[in-house]
Structures are given as structure tokens and as C-alpha cells.
């Protein structure tokens, strides 16, 4: 399972509305995300608008392609695009900056356990 962490910048003047929209995401959007491989998906928002997202998926590229095939995603992304800075022509679900994972506790514990067992 691929772990993906990403960042976007929400416009500071739109923070409250952005939070309201995510308190009641459309049920068909929720189902589409789940069906296309967006698992353990969370968003975290800092007061200045820095948005950090996290998800686990077999393949980010396949999860994004799966969502692109859903009509509800086009509607959702169209409504959400106005909340973000620096997207250019990209939709939020493909215009985010993926962060490099440099540490994962369970991965290192597994390696350490194997080394100690030798």
C-alpha cells in the first residue's frame, strides 16, 4: 500500500467555507473516493491555510484516474478549485505537491527486528 502525503494552500479568506464544505462532503463523492482506492484519507488544515492531505492507496495514479472517470469528481473539483492558491489550470486532486516520505516507524521496526534476529 502506497502512503501519500500532499500539500496545497487554501486561500486564507476562504478557510471557514472550506471547512464547512468538508464537514458535509457529498455522499456520492465519498463513495467514489472509497471505490477508487483513496483509503485512510485525511485532510489537516493550518490556520494560515496550509493543507496537508494523507491517504493510503495501491496506486496514486490509478486512484486519480479512477476519480477522473467519475462525474461527481468533476463537479467537486470544479467547486473546490476556487479555494486554492497556485493551482494554475490543474484541479486540486491532481495539482497538489506530493511530499517525500523519509521515515515510517513500522518499516524501520521491521528492519531492526530482522537485523536483531540474526
Image: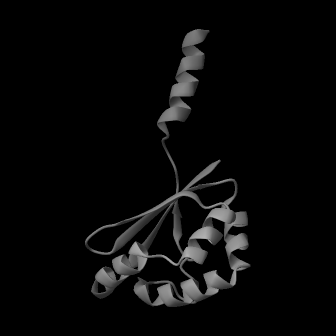
Q: Position of residue 17 (x, y in %)?
A: 34, 84
Q: At x 43% / y 83%, what residue is drawn? A: 84
Q: Nearer the viewer, residue 28 or 72?
A: 28
Q: In the rendered image, is residue 94 in sight? A: no
Q: Quadrant of the C terminus?
A: top right
Horizontal arrangement in the rendering, residue 49 relative to residue 60 (left or right): left
Q: Position of residue 94 (x, y in %)?
A: 60, 75
Horizontal arrangement in the rendering, residue 100 relative to residue 74 (left or right): left
Residue furthest out toward the top: 118
Q: Nearer the viewer, residue 99 or 67?
A: 67
Q: Nearer the viewer, residue 62 or 116?
A: 62
Q: Position of residue 64 (x, y in %)?
A: 67, 70
Look at the image and name its color scheme.
one colour
Q: Position of residue 38 (x, y in %)?
A: 61, 61
Q: At x 52% / y 72%, what residue is drawn? A: 96
18 lies above or below 62? below
Q: In the rendered image, is residue 1 in sight? A: yes
5 lies above or below 101? below
Residue furthest out toward the left: 47
Q: At x 65% / y 47%, what residue is drawn? A: 1
Q: At x 62% / y 63%, what residue is drawn? A: 34
Amino acid at each position: 500500500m502506497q502512503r501519500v502525503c500532499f500539500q496545497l494552500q487554501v486561500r486564507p479568506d476562504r478557510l471557514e467555507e472550506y471547512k464547512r464544505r468538508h464537514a458535509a462532503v457529498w455522499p456520492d463523492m465519498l463513495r467514489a473516493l472509497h471505490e477508487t482506492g483513496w483509503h485512510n484519507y485525511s485532510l489537516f488544515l493550518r490556520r494560515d491555510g496550509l493543507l496537508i492531505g494523507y491517504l493510503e492507496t495501491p496506486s496514486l495514479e490509478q486512484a486519480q484516474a479512477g476519480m477522473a472517470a467519475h462525474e461527481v469528481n468533476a463537479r467537486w473539483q470544479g467547486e473546490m478549485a476556487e479555494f486554492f492558491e497556485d493551482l494554475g489550470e490543474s484541479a486540486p486532486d491532481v495539482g497538489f505537491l506530493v511530499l517525500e516520505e523519509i521515515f515510517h516507524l513500522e518499516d524501520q521496526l521491521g528492519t531492526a527486528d530482522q537485523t536483531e534476529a540474526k
